[in-house]
Amino acid sequence: MATSSTAGTRAPDRPMRADARRNYDRLLGEARTSFAEHGTDASLEDIARRAGVGIGTLYRHFPNRHALMNAVFQEALTALLTRSRELAGSEQPCTALVEWLGAIVSHAGEYRGLAQALMSASVDRTSALTECHVPLRQAGARLLERAQASGSVRADVSIDDLLQLTNAIALAAEQTPADPALADRLLRLTLQGLRAAP
């Protein structure tokens, strides 16, 4: 969980009082559970009730739904950024890029509605989820540039298009739960489309 101050999660510059920290942690835990069970449009009132606090307390910590989603997504974000650094030295930069995009699809699939929200955040710089999108974009751009420099990925591919495509794949997989292999098939098609002509 992120502990630094961010505009989206309203984590204070100074340490929280013990009771405020307990409320914050309970809200985050209940949000994680509710988003996993019911999707990111789960009732904020229910999340507050399950955490044993009033809705006003939830909004003091998380001023809107995207701020709460941003806080919930921090663990996955850290894992994705770590994975991008691990893949940065791969001998097959194109495969490394697609593997990392696949990890995004997997993480987005944990919470119904997250892929769509991340797609929106990519064009709405005022969204609290921009705090997730920007570091993901930077990490992806480094992997893409390395793959392009190796000559394995077309020069006209942009990271913004790839992230939108990745979120679209996650959204398609979310909407087609009866076909668990759909995301992998779409990612393989993406790999074919990325490759530079021989």
Image (cartoon, rainbow, N blue to C red):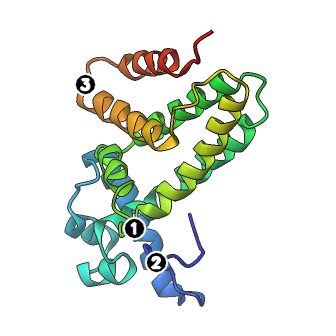
- Say which quarter of the image contains residue 55: bottom left
Image location of residue 65, percent across then percent down? 29, 66
- Say which quarter of the image contains residue 125: bottom left
Q: Nearer the viewer, residue 160 or 113?
A: 160
Numbered disc 2: secondary structure: loop
For marks 2 and 1 on the same chain, the one whose residue lies earlier in the sequence? 2
In 3D space, how far apart are the residues under numbered discs 1 and 3 (Cα atoms)?
Answer: 28 Å
Residue at mark 1: 128
Q: Residues within 10 Å of mark 2 (few under 14, many from 20)?
A: few
Mark 3 and 2 residues: CB-CB less than 8 Å, in contact?
no
Residue at mark 3: 176
Total marks shown come to 3
Residue 15 shows in this picture:
yes
Image location of residue 115, percent across then percent down? 35, 44
In 3D space, how far apart are the residues under numbered discs 2 and 1 (Cα atoms)?
Answer: 7 Å
Name the residue type under label 2.
Answer: Ala
Relative to 74, say whether 96 is above or below.
above
Mark 2 and 1 residues: CB-CB less than 8 Å, in contact?
yes
Image location of residue 34, percent across then percent down? 31, 54
Q: Residues within 10 Å of mark 3 (few under 14, many from 20)?
A: few
In 3D space, how far apart are the residues under numbered discs 3 and 2 (Cα atoms)?
Answer: 35 Å
Name the residue type under label 1.
Answer: Ala
Residue at mark 2: 7
Which residue reaches farthest top?
198
Locate the N terminus by quadrant. Answer: bottom right
Q: Nearer the viewer, residue 196 or 164?
A: 196
For marks 3 and 2 on the same chain, the one whose residue lies earlier in the sequence? 2
| Residue in the picture at 65% in, 21% down | 152
| Residue in the picture at 72% in, 44% down | 85
Mark 1 and 3 residues: CB-CB less than 8 Å, in contact?
no
